[in-house]
């Protein structure tokens, strides 16, 4: 099977705040499952439809200001942790839209910095 991703993903928990662009809802906080220059996999506690546009703030460790961009949900999956009465939770693949080149570079430096640290310990 051929790998279709353009960017290397890092399994990491990064704090994210998001708003649905088409609604007047409150900003919601969550964490990533993984991160790359092109997007994130984000844990959600409620279902958001595929193709929904989000305003995102990513809080990378050791960065004084969050990265602000928009993203589009390209896939979403439901999962449960625990028994049959467990609450439904979701993970969503979000592709960045309108991300500044310098913000992509910050993400790349973070991803490769962590990967390099992990490889030094092996």
Image (cartoon, rainbow, N blue to C red):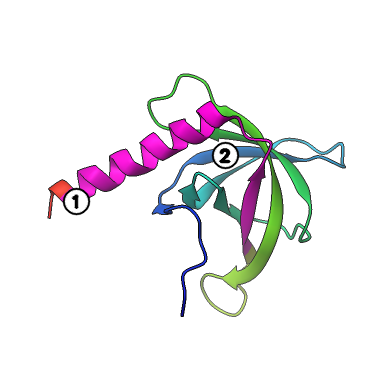
Q: Give the class, few, some or many, for how many residues have Cα within 10 Å of label 2's Cα (few <14, many ≥20).
A: many
Q: Nearer the viewer, residue 8 or 23?
A: 8
**In the rendered image, which quarter contains the C terminus?**
bottom left
Q: Residue furthest toward the top?
A: 64
Please tell me which residue is depicted at 65% across the width and 34% down the height of the picture.
Answer: 69
Mark 2 touching mark 1, by CB under 8 A? Answer: no
Q: Nearer the viewer, residue 74 or 43?
A: 74
Range of residues picked out in magenta? 90-119
Question: Judging from the image, what secondary structure is the residue with disc 1 in?
Answer: helix
Query: Percent x, y for residue 92?
Result: 63, 59
User: Which mark sits nearer the N-terminus, 2 or 1?
Assistant: 2
Query: Percent x, y for residue 90?
Result: 63, 63
Q: Which mark is residue 8?
A: none
Please tell me which residue is depicted at 64% across the width and 69% down the height of the picture.
Answer: 77
Q: Nearer the viewer, residue 106 or 63?
A: 106
Magenta stretch: dominant secondary structure: helix
Q: Give the class, few, some or many, for how many residues have Cα within 10 Å of label 1's Cα (few <14, many ≥20).
A: few
Question: Judging from the image, what secondary structure is the residue with disc 2 in?
Answer: strand
Please tell me which residue is depicted at 40% across the width and 31% down the height of the picture.
Answer: 61
Q: Is residue 63 left or right of residue 90?
A: left
Q: Which residue is mark 1?
A: 119
């Amino acid at each position: 099977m051929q790998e279709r991703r353009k960017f290397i993903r890092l399994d990491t928990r990064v704090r994210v705040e998001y708003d649905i662009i088409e609604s007047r809802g409150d900003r919601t906080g969550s964490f990533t499952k993984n991160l790359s220059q092109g997007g994130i996999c984000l844990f959600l506690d409620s279902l958001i439809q595929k193709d929904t546009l989000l305003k995102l703030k990513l809080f990378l460790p050791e960065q004084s200001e969050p990265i602000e961009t928009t993203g589009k949900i390209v896939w979403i999956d439901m999962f449960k942790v625990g028994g049959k009465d467990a609450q439904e939770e979701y993970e969503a693949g979000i592709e960045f839209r309108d991300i500044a080149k310098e913000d992509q570079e910050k993400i790349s430096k973070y991803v490769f910095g962590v990967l390099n640290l992990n490889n030094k310990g092996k």
